[in-house]
Image (cartoon, coloured by chain):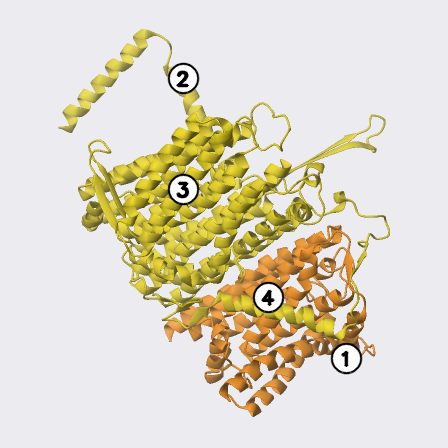
């Protein structure tokens, strides 16, 4: 019982000390002390989360802490799950971050501001799920948004250069990313504020308990409006299409440990908010809410992974893959709500369990992927896959860890991502038992979209690993890469241990996951039985025991390598040249790049992606038939951004320009506006009363 | 006794798969040769090739790494595990509870992925080209495979393959339903693509403009090449066997007796040989589709799979 408040108090104290240490200490001490304290915040928050998953609950009111309303806090298993994920990711990434910021100089992530803000951001990640009233929640939510914005901007003076190189003046892409992120996250806040204000006004109170009790008395149209407003805000935080535009800008530009935290811990909180509000506080809703969510999830999954397939920037690729995975999670949440709306509680619990398990799995492998990408960036100064390559020999540990995480991300058997996707597919496949034509049309489409995104994800991570880490370096900076320092490797090894544990013994998470699902009023343990080794569905005959799959694969590999050796004469392996068509040794320029790897997929999805090509031929002066220079430009823009955001931005800009005419500069005119405004207001009052 | 026969069935499936795969390839080449008016090299030729390759010295091309070395064994291993799970001979084995169709599909994809990584690991233009094309095709095959799985699992109420197969044995009407037929057609196209056969890929070409699978494995030689070839042949056998188990399930042992197991092995050989002969005959008359027309073919098979699911739902709902 008392473990949760004690752990949370410790986390808060550590974060406060960390913020002060970040402000006060000199550079050398700062990074180490803040890193250790941030890791402490993670451990404390994770402990609280694990305690909550273990079945303990806690609630309290601190009336003095927030003016007027007071701070309401409560921890249940659902909050515990997200706290545990955030805590675990924080602990490992903070260790990694010490290594990342050391030797980087006292700017970027090592700067005073960034180091002071980092522990506060860590604390907000742990505390958002604790909030149990609208005002507390929104305060913590905004704290998280602001601190992460500071951290995204940490490298605004040009970061990610290899050690010992002079830095350029300023990086416009970081500033642009910051602007996009600031605007979109605050638009989300406005929606959230509007939705929750409406909800609280109708329910007659702003604590979650009151909202939960009052939700059923609210007229259905208002409930629907609340859900739409809140869902838009939360899906935008989760990076779902079409509100994802900030994500592929902010995640690549942030310092890599911050990208890892944002992608593995912060976006999850969008899912948390959605589950908390949609399924718990509003208590579920009509089918159209969830069909909308399923559509959004399917679109994010496919669009996100397609953009990732086209990306040649390693961190941008990972950011789009986050969008994809959040799409899969949203599909699970949507399916869960849909099944619950049709009254099939066990199946709803299964779908939600799959979604939550995918949140955990995604956090583990994505944090590791971003950290490995950060190691590459730190060692080479490159994010462009077209220039990387050959890192397998130069950074063997990083390459191996990236491969491990990529296996999780492609959702194939020994990886951890496979288990949650398998559960999700099982819940969708068996969802046809639920009546309703909409269900019958939507579920097969969802399965198809998940399958398509899984298939393309395989191509994406083969590209990232095969082009980025294998073969030969395509740039001298990649050729000069050296392995990351021990602390970064230690942080990544912690994450890798988490990935392996989740892949081999997901059963360890079983009861906690059941409780988390139970926390929103679905029968937690009804649909799933978690054996010591794997997952078994009780109603449906299906089971998956990853440890056996791995054992069988290992045995088969031993068999496949051993048997031919018994037959063939034992000979030493000899080295030989690559086949060069008789034209001399192949150079790195001849290897396939990320762009060329993705070209067939780009052709297949030409109509969706609408790539832009520009060929510029300059002939020599003497003859138009002799070419002097050919310039070829190729770009795959984010089409949704083009079509959806740019018209809105243009309209806003032209409205702003038009409104400038109203401000003529004459004081008389402004007094006239004031007078007219007053008259209109008074008239409105007269008519209105 | 019960367990002995069960384990014998699993071992039997793996052995039949490993030993039969080169024979199936030899048989298909022979059928094809005769239809084209050639004498052919005989059914045993793939085995002779394997023996020859195994005796050669192992070669590591300069600049390749662990991914290149591990891929052949991984390709064979994934196929062996999938072969042990899928009910080729018997639906009642000690591992049949684990034989989930989604797992089987994913294991096959894992083998594809390993080879694609090996292709990129060589750092040659051919390796990258093959890997890129293979992953494009594989990513488009995946939805068809999973939707066919979905369609097949609706009448059985599970994605467990032995349960689907024994369900089909006990109520054959399921197979003749429109949903079943559509699913066969979709799955057949997916199998052709997954095993790199005409019209998606030509296993006997080495023309750089057209090759997919062969481009990826161009750098392999000696025992490694033997494993890659064996792996590819085993995949073909496995997927044809899976197709026959799902749609012509008769003869597969549902109980535990030695005679039924032997009968199942013989019938398995016959079914796969017939399927192989049909495929080989078809390949004589078909041409390979242009690489960028392949997505159209796969989109067609995807549509069939989607129709299968819809048909299955509405027909099941009506009855």
- Whether A511 is drawn above or below A47: the answer is below
Q: Position of residue A336 (x, y in %)?
A: 35, 58
In this rendering, do the residues under marks 2 and 3 share a single chain?
yes
Residue A162 x/y as whole percent: 62, 33
For chain B, give the colour.
orange
- Res. B305 in view: no
Dot placed on the residue nearer the N-terminal end, 2 or 3: 3
Residue at mark 4: chain: B
Frontmost of labels 3 and 4 is 3
Drawn side of residue A504 relative to residue B133, left or right? left
**Which residue corresponds to mark 2?**
A660
Q: Position of residue B188 (x, y in %)?
A: 60, 70
Task: Give the Cα separation between the discs numbered 3 and 1.
Answer: 66 Å
Q: How far apart in space, not on screen, are marks 2 and 1 (Cα)?
A: 86 Å
Q: Nearer the viewer, mark 2 or mark 3?
A: 3
Q: Colour of chain A?
A: yellow
Q: Which mark is residue A40?
A: 3
- The residue to which callout 4 is attached is B108
Mark 4 is surrounded, within 10 Å at the Cα level, by few (under 14), some (14 to 19) or many (20 or more) other residues, namely many
Q: CA distance from mark 2 to mark 3?
A: 52 Å
Q: Residue furthest left?
A: A689
Image quadrant in which you'd find residue A651: top left
Q: In this rendering, would A478 be left or right of B319?
A: right
């Amino acid at each position: 019982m008392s473990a949760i408040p004690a752990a949370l108090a410790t986390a808060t104290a550590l974060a406060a000390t960390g913020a002060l240490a970040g402000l006060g200490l000199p550079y050398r001490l700062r990074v180490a002390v803040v890193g250790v304290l941030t890791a402490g915040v993670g451990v404390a928050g994770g402990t609280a989360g694990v305690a909550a998953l273990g079945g303990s609950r806690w609630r309290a009111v601190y009336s003095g802490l927030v003016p007027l309303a007071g701070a309401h806090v409560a921890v249940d298993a659902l909050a515990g799950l997200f706290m545990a994920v955030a805590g675990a990711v924080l602990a490992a990434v903070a260790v990694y971050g010490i290594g990342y910021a050391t030797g980087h100089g006292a700017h970027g992530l090592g700067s005073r501001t960034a180091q002071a803000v980092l522990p506060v951001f860590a604390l907000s990640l742990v505390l958002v799920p604790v909030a149990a009233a609208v005002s507390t929640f929104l305060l913590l939510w905004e704290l998280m948004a602001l601190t992460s914005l500071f951290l995204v901007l940490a490298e605004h003076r040009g970061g990610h250069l290899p050690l010992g190189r002079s830095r350029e003046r300023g990086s416009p892409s970081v500033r642009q990313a910051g602007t996009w992120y600031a605007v979109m996250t605050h638009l989300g806040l406005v929606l959230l504020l509007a939705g929750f204000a409406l909800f609280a006004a109708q329910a007659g109170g702003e604590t979650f308990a009151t909202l939960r009790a009052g939700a059923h008395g609210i007229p259905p149209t208002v409930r629907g409006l609340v859900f739409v407003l809140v869902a838009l805000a939360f899906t935008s935080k989760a990076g779902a299409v079409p509100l994802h535009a900030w994500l592929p800008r902010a995640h690549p530009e942030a310092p890599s440990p911050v990208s890892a935290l944002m992608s593995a811990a912060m976006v999850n909180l969008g899912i948390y908010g959605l589950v908390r509000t949609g399924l718990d506080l509003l208590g579920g809703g009509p089918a159209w809410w969830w069909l909308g969510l399923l559509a959004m999830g399917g679109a994010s999954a496919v669009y996100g992974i397609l953009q990732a397939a086209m990306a040649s920037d390693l961190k941008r690729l990972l950011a789009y893959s986050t969008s994809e995975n959040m799409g899969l999670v949203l599909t699970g949440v949507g399916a869960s709500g849909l099944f619950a709306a049709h009254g099939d509680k066990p199946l709803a619990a299964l779908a939600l369990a799959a979604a939550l398990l995918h949140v955990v799995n995604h956090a583990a492998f994505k944090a590791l992927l971003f950290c490995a990408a950060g190691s590459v960036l730190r060692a080479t100064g490159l994010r462009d896959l077209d220039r990387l390559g050959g890192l397998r020999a130069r950074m063997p540990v990083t390459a191996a860890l990236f491969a491990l995480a990529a296996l999780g991300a492609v959702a194939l058997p020994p990886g951890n991502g496979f288990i949650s996707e398998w559960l999700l597919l099982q819940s969708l496949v068996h969802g046809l038992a639920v009546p309703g034509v909409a269900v019958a049309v939507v579920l097969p489409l969802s399965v198809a979209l998940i399958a398509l995104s899984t298939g393309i994800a395989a191509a994406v991570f083969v590209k990232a690993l095969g082009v980025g880490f294998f073969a030969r370096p395509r740039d001298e900076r990649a050729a000069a890469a050296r392995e990351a320092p021990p602390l970064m490797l230690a942080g990544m090894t912690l994450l890798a241990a988490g990935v392996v544990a989740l892949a081999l013994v997901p059963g360890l998470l079983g009861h906690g996951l059941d409780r988390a699902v139970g926390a929103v009023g679905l029968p937690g343990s009804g649909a799933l039985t978690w054996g010591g080794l794997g997952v078994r569905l009780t109603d449906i005959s299906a089971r998956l025991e990853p440890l056996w799959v791995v054992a069988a694969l290992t045995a088969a590999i031993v068999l496949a390598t051993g048997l031919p050796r018994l037959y063939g004469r034992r000979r030493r392996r000899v080295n030989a040249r690559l086949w060069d068509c008789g034209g001399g040794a192949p150079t790195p320029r001849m290897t396939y790049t990320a762009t060329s790897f993705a070209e067939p997929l780009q052709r297949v999805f030409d109509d969706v992606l609408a790539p832009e090509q520009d060929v510029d031929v300059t002939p020599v002066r003497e003859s138009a038939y002799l070419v002097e220079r050919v310039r070829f430009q190729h770009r795959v823009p984010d089409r949704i951004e083009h079509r959806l955001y740019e018209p809105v931005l243009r309209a806003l800009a032209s409205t702003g320009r038009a409104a400038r005419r109203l401000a003529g500069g004459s004081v008389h005119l402004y007094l006239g506006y004031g007078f007219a405004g007053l008259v209109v207001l008074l008239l409105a009052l007269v008519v209105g009363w | 006794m019960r367990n002995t026969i069960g384990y014998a069935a699993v071992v039997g499936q793996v052995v039949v798969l490993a030993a039969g795969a080169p024979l199936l390839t030899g048989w298909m080449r022979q059928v094809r040769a005769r239809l084209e008016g050639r004498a052919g090299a005989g059914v045993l030729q793939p085995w002779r090739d394997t023996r020859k390759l195994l005796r050669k010295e192992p070669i590591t091309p300069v600049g390749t790494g662990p991914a290149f070395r591990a891929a052949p064994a991984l390709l064979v291993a994934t196929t062996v595990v999938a072969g042990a799970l899928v009910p080729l001979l018997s639906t009642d084995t000690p591992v049949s509870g684990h034989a989930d169709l989604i797992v089987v599909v994913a294991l096959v994809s894992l083998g594809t992925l390993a080879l694609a990584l090996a292709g990129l690991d060589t750092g040659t233009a051919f390796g990258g080209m093959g890997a890129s094309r293979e992953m494009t095709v594989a990513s488009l095959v995946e939805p068809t495979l999973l939707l066919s799985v979905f369609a097949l699992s609706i009448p059985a109420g599970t994605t467990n393959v032995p349960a689907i197969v024994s369900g089909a044995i006990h109520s054959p009407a399921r197979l003749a339903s429109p949903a079943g037929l559509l699913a066969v057609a979709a799955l057949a196209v997916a199998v052709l693509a997954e095993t790199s056969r005409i019209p998606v890929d030509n296993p006997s070409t080495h023309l750089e403009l057209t090759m997919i699978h062969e481009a990826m494995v161009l750098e392999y030689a000696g025992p490694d090449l033997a494993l890659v070839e064996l792996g590819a042949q085993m995949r073909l056998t496995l997927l044809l066997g899976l197709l026959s188990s799902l749609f012509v399930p008769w003869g597969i042992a549902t109980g535990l007796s030695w005679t039924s197991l032997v009968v199942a092995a013989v019938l398995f050989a016959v079914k796969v040989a017939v399927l192989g002969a049909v495929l080989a005959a078809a390949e004589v008359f078909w041409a390979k589709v242009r690489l960028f027309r392949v997505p159209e073919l796969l989109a067609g098979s995807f549509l069939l799979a989607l129709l299968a699911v819809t048909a299955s739902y509405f027909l099941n709902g009506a009855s």
